[in-house]
Amino acid sequence: MSRFFSRNFAGLTPYTPGEQPQDKKYVKLNTNESPFPPSARAQAMAAKAAAGLQLYPDPTCRVLRERLGALYGLTADEVIVTNGSDEVLSFAFMAFCDNGVIFPDITYGFYRVFAELYRIPFEEIPLKEDFTIDIEDYKGRKETVFIANPNAPTGIPLTVAEIEAIVRSNPHRMVVVDEAYVDFGGESCAPLIAKYDNLLVTGTFSKSRSMAGARLGFGLACPALIQDLETLRYSTNPYNINRLTMAAGLGQLVDEEETRRNCRAIIQNRQYTITVLSEMGFDVLPSAANFVFAKHPAIGGKDLYLQLKEKGILVRHFDKERLKEYNRITVGSREQMDALLTTIKEILEE
Ligand SMILES: *Cc1c(COP(=O)(O)O)cnc(C)c1O
């Protein structure tokens, strides 16, 4: 730390992203990226947009917001687009948390980082023994609620009815539902937006839409909430969506059918992976996401992670007490899963 670093931030523990090794080629199952490239149209439109990079992008992102809105039955003024969904989550922490925040003790690690960054009092609510969320813990509380649905790194979803019960239980407090993984078998809360003015739903192009490298996320909410988020966007980085990303995003949305097909393939590969891992003796949580969370009685989580890495396969291990026997494994292509399963079998036989 330099002697110039603000005392306001000196105590921060930043978010630790998954490894993105640049040295050798791994079978990369550690950051829940898609094994499929963006659609040919998305690629071509981004390439074409490169010729206009001397110009700033459209700060209103109007067309992209209209198309995204149409996909969810909403209007453009009910949509904000951001540099990854991490950015809309960051804005939500800034905008809506004067009464503190609550979120599960096991969930997306960024929530805690944002709470600390913005000095928002937070409480982490323990998941039940089986890693599910008890919705009763969140009903009627005054703090803003952040819930990843499906949750990470467990993959376990809540139903829309369960989330609606939380939203309805206190209309004077906001609920933010992070739907980064919803396209892999969860139910979107977007249809609730017409009914509730205390609900923000966030989504991303990073997982189901194969665009993690482009950084494109979005928020869906009633127009007044979107306006608040826009105030923060225009106060930090009005050109947060660059021309290449905007063009690729528009192209990918035209090919929504391809996205759906890719998601169906991932869901199939997930079922296959769960079946084979279970046959090998793994305990696998019931996932509705593009990853599985699994542990084996004969090998520690860290040990398995390290041995897989040694053999060229990257998965995500968390050192946290309740998680350390597990690994979070991204569900990729059938070939990637076969490489993983064969290697795990070898490790267990050794
Ligand atoms: C991946 C992820 C995000 C956001 O990713 P972006 O790439 O910033 O859109 C948000 N929430 C959860 C739970 C995630 O796993």
Image (tube, grey):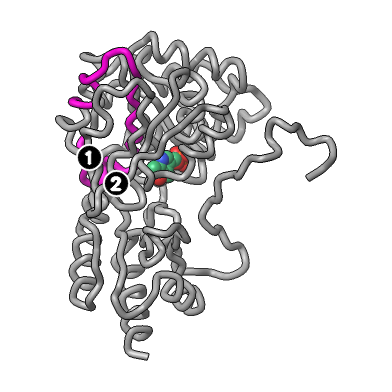
Q: Quadrant of the N terminus?
A: top right
From this viewpoint, is residue 284 visible? yes
- Judge whether residue 168 is colored magenta: yes
Q: Quadrant of ligand 1?
A: top left
Query: In the figure, residue 100 lies in which quadrant?
Result: top left
Q: In percent of the image, x 19 and y 61: which residue is there?
A: 271
Q: Which residues are magenta?
A: 164-187
Against 36, residue 85 (above or below) is above
- Judge whether residue 109 is colored magenta: no
Q: In percent of the image, x 48 and y 35: which residue is there?
A: 86
The label shown at residue 127 is 2
- Dot 2: within a 10 Å radius of its alpha carbon, few (fewer than 14), some, or many (20 or more) residues? some
Q: Quadrant of the C terminus?
A: bottom left
In space, the residues marked 2 and 1 are separated at their CA atoms by 7 Å
Q: Which element carries disc 1, helix, strand or loop?
A: loop
Q: Earlier in the sequence, mark 2 or mark 1?
A: 2
Q: In the rendering, at what x and y percent does residue 313 appear? A: 45, 71
Query: In the figure, residue 147 lies in which quadrant?
Result: top left
Report the amino acid beneath label 2: Leu
Q: Is residue 298 left or right of residue 166?
A: right
State the residue lying farthest toward the right.
3
Q: In percent of the image, x 22 and y 20: which residue is there?
A: 169
Q: Are marks 2 and 1 in contact (CB under 8 Å)?
A: yes
Disc 1 marks which residue? 134
Report the amino acid beneath label 1: Asp
